[in-house]
Image: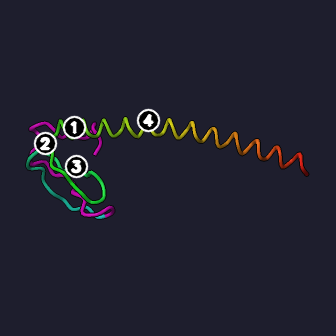
Amino acid sequence: MSARALGAVSSDKDEGKETLVPLSNSVYVRGKACDVDKVLLNVGTGYFVEKPTPAAQKHCEDRSGMINGNIGSLAKVLGEKRQNLEMCMAVMQQKM
C-alpha cells in the first residue's frame, strides 16, 4: 500500500468496510476491515510488521524517497555508461 492509500483507510468510517485481501501476488479474497488503526506492513522477503497507520505511512514515504534518490543516482550512472559506449563505438569506427 502506498502512503496515500494508507491515508485513505485510516478513518473510522472504513471499519467494517469490505475490501480485497491478498493471499499471494495474484490471489485475493473478500474481507472486512476490522482494525484500521493498525496495518500489516510488508518489509521484504516475506516478513510483515504490524504498525500504527501513521507510522506505516511515514515508512512508505521514507521508502519512496529512498527509491526516488536511487533512481536519480542510477540515471547519472546510466548517462556515464552511455557516454562510454559512444566513445567505444567512435574508436571502433575509426579502426575500421
As shown in the figure, which amino acid type bears the numbered disc 2?
A: Asp
Numbered circle sitting on residue 69:
4
Which residue was labeled with disc 3?
Answer: 41
As shown in the figure, which amino acid type bears the numbered disc 1?
A: Ala
Indicate the position of residue 1 as horizontal and vertical percent values. 28, 46
Q: What residue sits 64% from the left and 43% below the top? A: 81
Foreground mark, 2 or 3, reads: 3
Crowd band around label 3 with a 10 angstrom C-alpha radius: few (<14), some (14–19), many (20+): some
Crowd band around label 1 with a 10 angstrom C-alpha radius: few (<14), some (14–19), many (20+): few
Position of 55 with respect to 95 (left or right) is left
Which residue was labeled with disc 1?
Answer: 8
Can you name the residue that lies furthest to the right here?
96
Foreground mark, 2 or 4, reads: 4
Which residue was labeled with disc 2?
Answer: 14
Q: Quadrant of residue 83?
A: top right
Could you tell me which secondary element the residue under label 2 belongs to? helix
Q: Earlier in the sequence, mark 2 or mark 4?
A: 2
Q: What residue sits 12% from the left and 50% below the top? A: 33
Distance, label 2 to label 1, CA atoms, is 9 Å
Could you tell me which secondary element the residue under label 4 belongs to? helix
Distance, label 2 to label 4, CA atoms, is 33 Å
Q: Which residues are magenta?
A: 1-26
| Above or below: residue 34 compared with residue 71 | below
